[in-house]
Amino acid sequence: MSSVEITGLSKSYGDREILKGLDLKVEAGESFTLLGPSGCGKTVLMRLLAGFETPNRGRIRIGDDVVADAGTNVPPDRRGIGMVFQDYAVWPHMSVRENVAYPLKIQRVPAEDRDRRTNRAIGQVGLTGLEDRMPSQLSGGQQQRVALARALVSEPKLLLLDEPLNNLDANLREEMRFEIRELQQKLGITIVYVTHDQEIALAIADRIGVMDETGALRQVGRPDEVFDRPADAYIYRFLGVANFVPMHRVDGEWRFPDGIGRWTEAPPDLPGDRLTLGCRPFDIVVTRSGDGLPGIVRRASFLGAQMDYLIEAGGVTFRAATDSRRALSPEYCFADGESCRLTFRGAQWFDAAASDGEGGPR
Amino acid sequence: MTGTLRFGTPQILFGLAVAILVVFVAVPVLLIFFNALWVDGAFNLADTIKVLSEPETYRALINSLILASGVTVTGTIVGTFFAWLVTRTDLPYKGAMKVLFLVPFMLPSFIGALAWKMLLSPRSGYINRFFMETLGFPDAIFNIYSYHGIILVETMYLFPFVFIQVCGALERMDPTLEESARISGADLFTITRKITIPLVMPSILSGALLIMLYSMAHFGTVAMLGIEAGIYNIPTLIYERIHQSAGSFASIRTATVLSTVLVFTAALIIWAQNKILSGGRYQIIAGKSFRPTEIRLRGLRTPLLLFCIAYIGFTIVLPTVTIFLVGGLNTYGLPISPENMTFDNYYHILFEWDLTRDAIWNSIGLGFASALITMFAGVIISYVIVKMKVRGKGILEFLGMLPFSVPGSVIALGVILAWSGKYGVNIYNTIWIILVAYIARYMAFALKANSAALEQVHNSLVEAARASGATMWQALRDIVIPLVRPGMVAAFFLIFLPALRELTVSVLLYGPTTRTIGVAIYTLNEDGETVYAAAMSGVALIIIVTAEVVVKRFFKVKQ
């Protein structure tokens, strides 16, 4: 396992600057996820790490080796990496065994050792028994496992995964992300995982780096840190459905946009008289009566595990969610148009600009 | 160290690709332009125009135009009509008919021309003699040594270009377009005129341009039938000049000027074809297959079937049978009857006569070698064009387009200019010069087949190999080549089969021992050895048809 150190990395295609002066350190043995919207440059960063692209400026160090800087660009085959591609890239003319054994064959590993390690890698991804199948006889998930085994078989210093679960169906995606996590912990390899899916990112990572459209890293931290203490509204929005409410202070009291509703929870510790309140649907507790902000249920949608509400309150529309057990009990079963009260279990405060033109639920 | 390696492999591949195209294609063509437009080292367009306005040159240009236009019109009409018949009507045995209409594609047209000469030459043609001697006609009923004759024969062999394109378009056309017109109250004639024809027009035009492209540069038929009547087109005049004058400056110059005209015409036709095919109107014809509504021929069903059978009998069976029968005659001109027949000619050609035996092995060897070399060169060049990101790829793309627009006689002439000692290498009169010319001529096929196959190989498959530790060469060897193998095999046969029956290029380049099958037939005919020419044609037909059938069978089994 190797650490990865990226310093001042820049990459542009013609006039289009994708990355400018990016710094990042991934510790040895760490599972690191790069999370960002499509087109943010995370795939470019991945391809720079793999050696498929040459940086314009900056340095990449894998372990003790500088693999790219002003004078050097080590080709992909000399970087000692394993890589899993979004479209599997399983070679269609080779059997499962041949696919997985290929990196060892290239390294001229003796046949006996090669067979042993190939079998082990195939076993690790749970494909034992399918060694002689051709890729066309495998399902998408099985092909993805072949790609994973192929990337793992040579015990790479660094494993790069480029949205490898995108093309799988939801159940398989969930299953695979735990398996990758488990394998990573068992083998102790360093992983850099690129995705735009925040659920995968949160589930799989020791640390997450969130990128924005300009190719800048907004925040790097543990999943719970990034989720619970986002550096800014952008990250908060990116990590899940969020309500943004422009709030103002009157006589030391925080009021909702209608000027009537009052914020009764702990006040924000940010300066200023105008701020943005951010809250997730599950932060909002919907009750029939009591204290809380008065509102009207505009739409209640049953989504199976939870009930999803659109609620007009305080001059804005909130999205709120309650787990179905509770929401279906007579006491909490709201019909459209019924009045309710809202209390807040949690909240994030951002500056006023966060809600400009983008307030309300997303 | 690592830096040089990164720039090394792509640069080598790129350099190799450029070198192949420059040496085999660009240099010969440039030498032609240079010889055509420069006099004594100075650009001189006036002199070029002077050459073009000489009566013989001018006449050849006009003849090429007349013949190509004539063949294009008749070929398009014939091809469109038969295509409509086998796709949109309830004609019986449509499937078999469709296959039969494609047979002319396999047969070399100069062999057809030879057969028609035997049937319809004004004095000795068997049909003409039958009419004069048996039915008492005062004159020959048809003189094949004429514009009409040439157009007739070329049409028989070139109409499949339009036939294939139009069949494809008609089969893919959404029948609801016609049905909705029908519901709106249009009768069948109106629908055909207002809906069907406009929709398949791009396919018709594109096929027509292919016929034109081919006919402009066509040597065999005109050489067999035109020279007798003093009708030369551009390729036959080039041949005439090069052969008669043994390399005099004036004749080379005329030939290069004519070649230049041919290249520009071909480029223009290809440009027009791309323009038509990329036009928006084409999109109404979807990629998927529909079951088109069939038009009921009713009372016309049997007459039209008989017409198709008669056409096939007249254009395919009759010439083929004639070739084999004349090839078995003791002496040309004798009536075709059992007492005049012998197998001696065939035996002589196959086992005794060096000239013909050499020719057969030359053709097979040349076809094999050129197909193999061009196939590998095509993979490398297509790989650089389709898959690699290197500076200067634009040049390569341009060079890669070049082989498509250079006709055979131009290639041959360019190869003569480049490889007969003027630039250090003299392979003139050897088999190698023909091989070099074949590689140039068939490069276009290899590029087309291989690019198509390479487009199917996703980049990540190669990158996965690189990430697995493979160098670019290893990735090429282990991943790319195995995956494009079907395209390579296709390229091989796309080259091998036409090379077997090649005439246009080899006739300009052959030496005493380097005749090809086509050249052997052509020179035997020129020397008045009609019977041997026919026998050799018969042997060639058997070889060609066998090869075609074996290849088709092989591909069908693989699928």
Image (cartoon, rainbow, N blue to C red):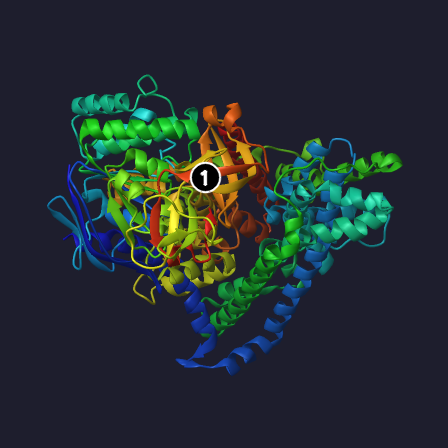
Rendering coords of residue B162 (x, y %): 66, 49
Q: Nearer the viewer, residue A120 or B79?
A: A120
Q: Where, by quadrant of the figure, is residue B264 drawn? A: bottom right
Whether residue B492 appears in this view of the structure is yes
A243 vs B19, left or right, is right
Q: What residue type is labelled 1?
A: Leu
Circle 1 sits in a helix, a strand or a loop, which is it? Answer: strand
Q: Which residue lies furthest to the left in this view?
A: A64
Q: Residue at x 68, y 46 (%)?
A: B166
Residue at mark 1: chain? A
Q: Where, by quadrant of the figure, is residue B73 drawn? A: bottom right
Q: Which of A331 and B118 is in front in this view?
A: A331
Q: Which residue is drawn at 34% across and 39% down?
A: A85
A77 vs B197, left or right, is left
Graded by Cα atoms within 10 Å as few (under 14), some (14 to 19) or many (20 or more), the crowding at tag 1 reads many
Q: Where, by quadrant of the figure, is residue B417 drawn? A: bottom left
Q: Which residue lies furthest to the top in this view?
A: A129
Q: Residue furthest right?
A: B299
Rendering coords of residue B381 (x, y %): 38, 52
Rendering coords of residue B266 (x, y %): 56, 62
Rendering coords of residue B543 (x, y %): 53, 36
Whether residue B121 appears in this view of the structure is no
Q: In this view, does B110 lie above or below B54?
A: above
Name the residue that disc number 1 marks. A342
Figure disc tally:
1
B11 vs B236, left or right, is left
Q: Nearer the viewer, residue B72 or B480?
A: B480
Q: Nearer the viewer, residue B204 or A103?
A: A103
A220 vs B20, left or right, is left
Q: Residue at x 34, y 50 (%)?
A: A349
